[in-house]
Amino acid sequence: MKPEPDPKGKEPSKAGVLAILAGALVAAAGPRLFASFPRILENPIMPFLSLLVALLFILATMLKVLKEYERGVVFRLGRVIGAKGPGLIILIPLIDRIQKVSLRTVAMDVPPQDVITRDNVSVKVNAVIYFRVMDPVNAIVQVEDYLYATSQIAQTSLRSILGEAELDDLLTGRDNINHRLQEVIDAQSDPWGIKVASVEVKHVDLPTEMQRAMAKQAEAERERRAKIINAEGEFQAAQRLFEAAETIAAEPVALQLRYLQTLTEVAAENNSTVVFPVPIDLIKAFAEKRSGGGGD
């Protein structure tokens, strides 16, 4: 018996070589094995060993232990009979099948999605979704893979919801967007027995050109606020000066007091020269007196 040639080449395949070796071993050891088989059966220990192995196999297939956070969906001849657990579960061998489901909260990372916002800005957004299984039977029966299905719904919902929002809402109103995403994903996954606790938008990746435009806008906004604050300061200072002028005009003595206070402040410094201003009222009084004497 020759080994079959490899279809990719002319050399014999590994399977053919192994088949030849197996055939040779069976041919060499076959007669001895079959000759000793009746003596093995005549051994009184062998039936008990066979029974023990069979019992261990049956117990291994009958008894299942589920943890506190696990539930087992039992299928009997292909039909669902319900969810069992936690603790010890007894199954009928070769008839019942069990599939475990975890009830713990799953934190699933939504891959970055390319989104075009309502104001035609291309951004890349990723998120995280927190959900758990509330009905193990529906999670197994209604959908093939509830983890994969929930991930796909989260990705499509993220693109659709963010496509309806503007960039400013995406950057400043994330709470509303997160709430809308949670409602949409929870409504679509509810028939599968899935409860979506929350959805959080993690990161918004903006294009470089948009980042520069936003930086210029923020800089212009700061300059506008600085000019407004400066103008308000000038306006308040002018109001105070106007009120001070009215007060001094009503009381001429206040001007003299202010004058003396200014001299005190100037004299307090080590200056070699002191400018001594002469009040206009004093000069005016002398001028009036001189003009009155000339008239006489």
Image (cartoon, rainbow, N blue to C red):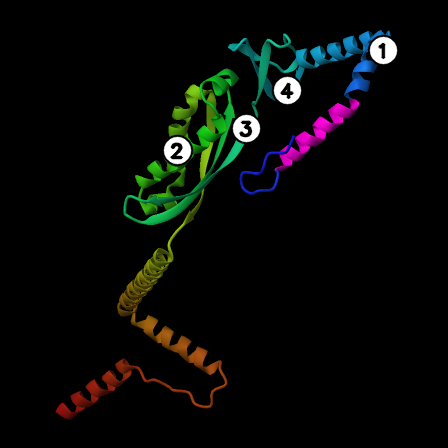
Q: Residue at x 31, y 64 (%)?
A: 227
Mark 3 Cα within 10 Å, few/some/many (few <14, many 20+)? few
Q: Earlier in the sequence, mark 2 or mark 3?
A: 3
| Residue positioned 38% across, 35% down in the render | 156
Q: Which quarter of the image is occupied by the C terminus?
A: bottom left
Q: Which residue is mark 2?
A: 181
Which residue lies at the image location 37% right of the left edge and 86% below the top edge?
A: 276
**How many other residues sit within 10 Å of disc 1, few (<14), some (14-19) or many (≥20)?**
few
Q: Can you identify the residue that label 4 sits on?
A: 68
The one nearer the camera, 69 or 4, is 4
**Residue 139 vertical placement versus 212 (above, below):** above
Which type of secondary structure does the marked residue at label 2 adopt? helix
Q: Which residues are magenta?
A: 13-29
Dot placed on the residue nearer the N-terminal end, 4 or 1: 1
- The amino acid at mark 2 is Leu
Image coordinates for residue 259, horizontal then vertical, percent: 37, 77
Measured as percent of width and height from the top left, residue 166 is found at 31, 44
Q: Is residue 120 toward the left or the right of residue 59 in the image?
A: left
Q: Earlier in the sequence, mark 2 or mark 1?
A: 1
Q: Which residue is mark 3?
A: 105
Q: Is residue 6 magenta?
A: no
Q: Secondary structure at mark 3?
A: loop
N-term mark: 4 or 2: 4
Q: Quadrant of the N terminus?
A: top right
